Image: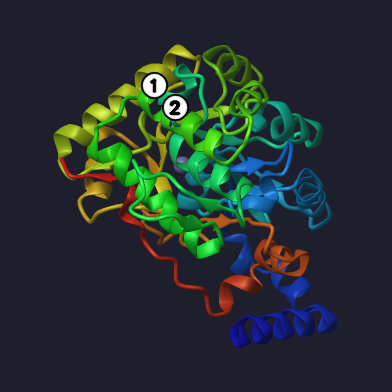
């Protein structure tokens, strides 16, 4: 917390003295690329639930700030080429979205279109074809909706769990473990979500009708590709594997669908949950992937490893001053928060 306050003080000072504005116009910044990461833009209350969502007002404001700061928003392919060639324009930025929840189609993309910004959607495809809420985040969202009650579910939980923040995390982990141990199918997991909702007195069918935490459909993906969205790799099942063979099969499952939806030769990848093993960058390169983004904050330079590119995850917790600091480059000079690698997306095969 003290570090955050110190960073804010530096940013305020750099703003007041004109130092951050000056930095934004230097060669130092011109040779760097900022890749922004978003997951969802809220349609209902999702931005109050966790860090995956931001509100529509904040998202719109961020897009305005990009314009105020005269950033050059580039498609990812062009940005990577120019990063390598040393021909980036001033204040280069790439906008990426992960996963492909329905709100990308109904909220975020119309805003991006309005501003004329190119965008990359790293699309995970299993739930594009299975039209139900995505299990892991839906589990966490339902528990949040039921916050401050007590969940009794003897089949799944050893003991009743009070749904405060820590309890919700414990309960989500136990429910996910339960689904994995029983090797539940998509439909089985969906039944489990429906039972959870009933226990928490939440109308699950209504949540499904409103398409909360559901992904876009194949038709919507095709429509987005036609309107210029760059559809790229994020694995089919939102999973990574230890072996080359399984990783290649997973990429191929994802690629086949992206191409069927109208994607033009997907070549860029985003690590699921930001997680990767030491062997993954090599596998991706061998498969023909040109770039892979992480969730480690930072600016990309000509020396960055293209299979481990840093990316700024934008959240409700980031102030406008900090956001501007990233566009101008000064935030990248301040001490950065360590990002933990979560193994949740790894399958032991
Ligand atoms: Zn993801």
Numbered badge on residue 190:
2
Q: Is residue 298 in view? A: no
Return the residue nearer the eye: 272 or 115: 272
Q: Quadrant of residue 116?
A: top right
Is 260 drawn above or below residue 230 in the view shown? above
Q: Secondary structure at mark 1?
A: helix
Q: Is residue 273 above or below residue 228?
A: below
Residue drawn at x 30%, y 52% is: 276
Q: Which residue is mark 1?
A: 187
Residue 94 in percent (x, y) is at 60, 46
Residue 306 pos. (x, y %): 38, 51
Q: Residue at x 42, y 32 (%)?
A: 192
Q: Are marks 2 and 1 in contact (CB under 8 Å)?
A: yes
Q: Dividing the image into 4 quarters, which one contains the N terminus?
A: bottom right
Horizontal arrangement in the rendering, residue 227 relative to residue 344 (left or right): right
Q: Position of residue 93 (x, y in %)?
A: 63, 50
Is the CB atom of the residue marked by disc 1 within 8 angstroms of ligand 1's nearest atom? no
| Circle 2 crowding by C-alpha within 10 Å: few under 14, some 14–19, many from 20 | some
Residue 77 locus on image (x, y percent)? 50, 37
Which one is in front, 69 or 137?
137
Q: Is residue 137 left or right of residue 44?
A: left
Image point (45%, 19%), residue name: 130
- How many residues crowd around disc 1 within 10 Å: few (fewer than 14), some, or many (20 or more)? few
Residue 257 in the image: above or below residue 95: above
Residue 91 visible, this orientation? yes
């Amino acid at each position: 917390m003290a570090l955050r306050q110190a960073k804010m003080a530096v940013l305020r000072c750099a703003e007041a003295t004109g130092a951050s504005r000056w930095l934004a116009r230097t060669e130092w910044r011109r040779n760097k690329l900022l890749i922004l990461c978003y997951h969802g833009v809220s349609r209902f209350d999702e931005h109050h639930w966790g860090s995956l969502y931001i509100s529509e007002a904040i998202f719109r404001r961020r897009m305005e700030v990009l314009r105020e700061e005269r950033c050059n928003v580039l498609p990812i392919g062009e940005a990577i080429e120019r990063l390598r060639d040393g021909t980036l324009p001033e204040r280069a930025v790439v906008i990426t979205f992960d996963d492909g929840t329905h709100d990308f189609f109904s909220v975020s993309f119309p805003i991006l279109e309005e501003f004329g910004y190119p965008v990359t959607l790293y699309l995970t495809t299993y739930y594009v074809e299975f039209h139900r809420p995505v299990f892991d985040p839906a589990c966490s969202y339902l528990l949040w909706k039921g916050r401050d009650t007590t969940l009794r579910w003897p089949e799944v939980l050893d003991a009743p769990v009070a749904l405060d923040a820590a309890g919700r995390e414990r309960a989500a982990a136990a429910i996910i473990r339960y689904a994995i141990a029983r090797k539940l199918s998509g439909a089985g997991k969906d039944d489990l979500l429906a039972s959870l909702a009933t226990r928490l007195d939440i109308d699950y069918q209504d949540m499904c009708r409103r398409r909360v935490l559901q992904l876009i459909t194949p038709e919507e993906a095709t429509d987005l590709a036609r309107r210029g969205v760059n559809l790229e790799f994020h694995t089919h099942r939102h999973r990574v594997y230890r072996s080359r063979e399984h990783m290649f099969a997973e990429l191929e499952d994802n690629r086949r669908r992206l191409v069927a939806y109208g994607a033009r030769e997907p070549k860029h990848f985003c690590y699921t949950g930001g997680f990767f093993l030491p062997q993954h960058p090599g596998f991706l390169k061998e498969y023909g992937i040109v770039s892979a983004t992480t969730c480690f904050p930072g600016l990309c330079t000509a020396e960055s490893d293209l299979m481990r590119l840093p990316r700024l995850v934008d959240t409700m917790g980031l102030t406008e001053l900090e956001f501007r600091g990233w566009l101008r480059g000064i935030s990248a000079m301040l001490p950065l928060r360590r990002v933990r690698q979560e193994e949740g997306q790894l399958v032991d095969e």
